[in-house]
Amino acid sequence: MKRSYLLIALIILSACSDSADDSNREIDTVILNDLIQHSTEFEKKVYSFENGLHIAVGYGIANSIMVEGVDGNIIIDASDSVAEAEEVYSYFSTINSNPIKAIIYTHNHGDHTFGAAYYYNLEVEKPMVIAHESTSQYVERIMGILNPIISKRSTRMFGTDLPSEQVINVGIGPYLGVAQSPIGYIKPTLTFADELKINISGVEIELYHAPGETNDQLFVWLPNQKALMPGDNIYRTFPNLYTIRGTPHRDVKSWVKSLDQMRALKPEYLLPSHTKPLTGDAVMETLTIYRDAIQYVHDQTIRLMNEGYTADEISHLIELPTEVSNSPFVREFYGTIRWSVKSIFNGYLGWFDGNVSNLDPLPSEEYARRLVTLSGSEEKLFLALEEAVQEKDMQWALQLSDSLLALNYKIDSTNKLRQEAIQYIGGRSLNPNKRNYFLSSANELNRNYEAQPLLPQTSELLREISIDMFFEILSVRLNPKKAKGITQRVCFLFDSGETRTITMRNQIAEISSTNKNCDIQVKTSEQTLKESLAGVRNPVLSVASGEIDTGGQRTKFLSFLSNFTE
């Protein structure tokens, strides 16, 4: 994805209306220049060190690292697609063409795992794939039960549906390229719980579980090289202590402890999975500043929580100390203090902020109707929206449009004004996550918008996902309206010898391994069922052909499956 910064400048500056004052134009220029300058952090380049370490930066959102061994090499983080991994390796192989003996995932995110199949298929003797014991569980969670919502929100946050000239960068890399080729995730073949010390091709490697950006995060320590690969626990921007695409709660206190564990090793080389490597004194200085920034936000959030402030109030009260905020490693190009505060609050106390007004608020439609009563009419509310957009009071405009849309009032006109407000706020955001999310949301309001799948399914990918995940998917996608009044048990016998049962009752689907008292007995292979449920093959044809054997109850089984559709 190529960038034309001149074109970006013209687009953003032209987004300022004629009524925008000079100060707004100046702010836009400053923000634009800051974002463009930050993009130099992702200049496409392989950095090589005399100790056999090589890190590819700027080939995609995440870095990929090669460690040279005696008779083979190790890859740490495998890029976000097979196409990207192939491009990275085309350079790595010119440095050292020995076979790949191992692939190490620092954590479960696709930009670190989805290119692994390239290296795996490259070798006759398959490399080990090493990760924390919970990594495959989190990969399957994203690929499975949360795929629709995580894909949608990730598409927005990384701007994958935006014209390339609108995406300046994505905060920790130039762009997300996961959709440029089939997903090449390979399930780990060697896992560990707390630590793993192993020699691979003469390289002494120590792996430590280090929760931070993810619960399964690990860091790689090469004691002989004094080299640290911290994964996503540090990069040149304030961290995503919370990510707006959605994620399990990130334990901020554990993140600080993980950074302290790294500091105790006194590394001389720091090769992060995003942004450029560091060497020498800068390594310890940066690790210390980074952990202090995270601890400050954590501790001050807790202090103000105990004084009775709400999450929203705290998010506007905390600023980093000057001696910390001066570091380029804590600029808000990825995470923000505001979002972090709210996540920390929620992690300790849950979503309720303590204000009784917010415990059971009015539904949005009812709130909108009462707002109309106060204003006098729906039309007056709409006129207030028009005025807010004209006055560039865009956050108020968004909230007004929420109420009008809840009332289904002038949908087209309201969405047009809403789109203008979203574009205005997004175009003026320093934070790429927010900027891309807003501009993508505005793009979705275009009449001709068609969403592109971020995580397309393939037969190869489905082999790496457990059959249990597919039954979990069925469980959470049961349509209660269709299942009302149905009590039914469908038993599955796979050619592997595994059994699974779905018992439908009380508008839920219980998953078990009990194959007794079955209303329908299904015989098939795990792969055939996976592909049929994922849409890789037509389930009706699979049943008709007998690949999914229903014991003569084809119509009944297909009717059963229909309960899991909207």
Image: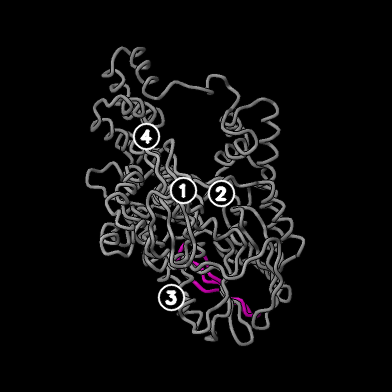
Residue 30 shows in the view: no
Q: Which residue lies furthest to the front in this view?
A: 517
Is residue 203 within the magenta segment? no
Q: In this view, does 373 lie above or below 388?
A: above
Three-letter code for the amino acid on which mark 3 is drawn: Glu
Drawn side of residue 131 relative to residue 439, left or right:
right
The answer for how far apart the CA atoms under marks 3 and 1 are is: 27 Å
User: Which numbered circle lies on residue 485?
Assistant: 4
Nearest the eye: 215 or 37: 215
Q: What stretch is highlighted in magenta?
A: 45-66
Q: Which residue lies furthest to the right in this view?
A: 264
User: Which numbered circle lies on residue 433?
Assistant: 1
Drawn side of residue 314 relative to residue 364, left or right:
right
Nearest the eye: 33 or 506: 506
Three-letter code for the amino acid on which mark 2 is drawn: Asn
Label pair 2/1, CB-CB below 8 angstroms: yes
**Residue plotted at (36% across, 23% down):** 365
- The residue carrying pointer 1 sits among few (fewer than 14), some (14 to 19) or many (20 or more) residues within 10 Å by Cα, namely many
Q: Nearer the viewer, mark 4 or mark 1?
A: 4
Three-letter code for the amino acid on which mark 1 is drawn: Asn
Q: Is residue 224 above or below residue 159?
A: below
Residue 409 shows in the view: yes
